Amino acid sequence: MRPEGEQAMPLRRDWTGWLFVLMTAAAIVAVLYASNHAGAGKHGVRPHPVAPPADVVPEVAPVELAPVSEADAKAQNAEIPLVTKGFVAARPFIYAGSGDGRARARDCLAAAMLYEAGDDAKGQQAVGQVVINRARHPAFPKSICGVVFQGSERTTGCQFTFTCDGALNRRYSDAAWARAQANAEMMLSGTTYPKVGLATHYHTDWVRPYWSDSLEKIAVVDTHLFFRWPGFWGTPGAFRGLVSGNDAGIVKMAALSPSHALAIGTLPPVELAGVDANAAVGEAKLVPGAGEKAGRDTIYVSLDRRATPESFVTTALRLCGEKPYCKFMGWTNPMLKPDSDAMSDMQRSAMTFSYLRDDRAGFEKALWNCSEYKRDDVRQCMKR
């Protein structure tokens, strides 16, 4: 109703109203278009991020920790949001090589799993998955051992701290090492640990690496936090690198892994631990009456007292070669080295080092005379 006396206004075209309607409709169309292309789309396919140029990869900096207390680190780490969008589990990984190369890769992976996570199967698999993720990623070395020992030549800042902080001087039990090797072998044969997805970084919640804020936290396993790179470098398209199937020997693994000890024994046999290899091989023979089947050899060797005790392993592996069964015994006192298994009690107690391999029984053991060479792990000492 209009007030009395007020005349009706003539009808006219309201261009302002029409313009508002058109702008609203255009905005709705734009939103629908963006949703259709950024989301699943009518075919249910989400477009992948565009890959950067091949020569542009993220920088892998030495690991440096912020100078904060454990309590502050835990509080700050808890504030980092857990990113679940775009979470993808890693594809199964099958190691391409076999033989010695595979054994070296297995032992490098087993060492990382055991020394980083302890004798815990779940933690070991989480660490193993990160190692494999890195080996597939263009920012990291293209071998299992290369990834594990990246930066290990530094005293600090290596990628896996056990490789540069002296932890390898500590020995776990033979049973723990065997379990880690078995877990590593499974991961080289296609086993995955989906919970950590495509994580390439992790740390415990009581430390604060400087890179924490630049990556996306995607998983928590007990006290370990797992991260991926944001953008393309954290998507499945980035994990397409070919991984070497012939891992090289690592010096720091020699005392732990016979496969690595053999690989780095590059000196001529005559120079190994002061041993005349030709004479030693000539002494290898069957021992009558020792209960050994044909083809089982026992080697008696004089060792150089000035050599490092770890070098005796290299000598034994070189002289035993590919024999499925080999017994190696060495003495630093050449006057007490016997010529057969019929040795005196004095000769036996003076033995410096022994190595026994029995592939059929799945047994391999190296022992030292700890009254002559002290070992950190008493399980490496001969019984007296």
Image (tube, grey):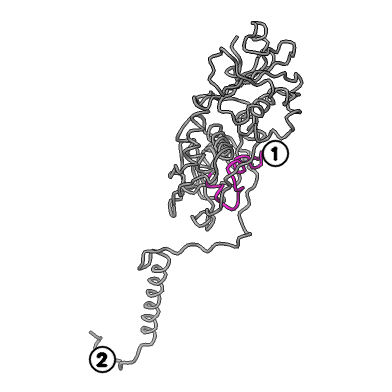
Residue 174 in sight from this viewpoint: yes
Q: Earlier in the sequence, mark 2 or mark 1?
A: 2
Question: Is residue 305 toward the left or the right of residue 4 in the image?
Answer: right
What is the distance, in whole Å, between disc 2 and disc 1 at their CAs?
96 Å
Whole-percent x, y for residue 378 in the image:
59, 17
Mark 1 secondary-structure assignment: loop
Q: Is residue 272 magenta?
A: no
Given the image, on which type of amino acid does mark 2 rest?
Gly
Whole-percent x, y for residue 376 in the image:
63, 20
Q: Nearer the viewer, residue 296 or 366?
A: 296
- Determine the image quadrant of residue 275: top right
- Magenta segment, principal secondary structure? loop
Please name the residue shown 40% across and 71% down the image. Answer: 31
Whole-percent x, y for residue 336 in the image:
71, 10
Magenta segment boundaries in residue numbering: 132-159
**In this figure, which residue is indicated by the disc labeled 2?**
5
Given the image, on which type of amino acid does mark 1 rest?
Arg
**In this figure, which residue is indicated by the disc labeled 1?**
154
Label 2 crowd (10 A; few <14 / some 14-19 / many >=20): few
Q: Is 21 above or below relative to 77?
A: below
Label 1 crowd (10 A; few <14 / some 14-19 / many >=20): few
Please name the residue shown 48% across and 46% down the image. Answer: 93
Q: Is residue 150 magenta?
A: yes
Quarter of the C terminus within the rendering:
top right
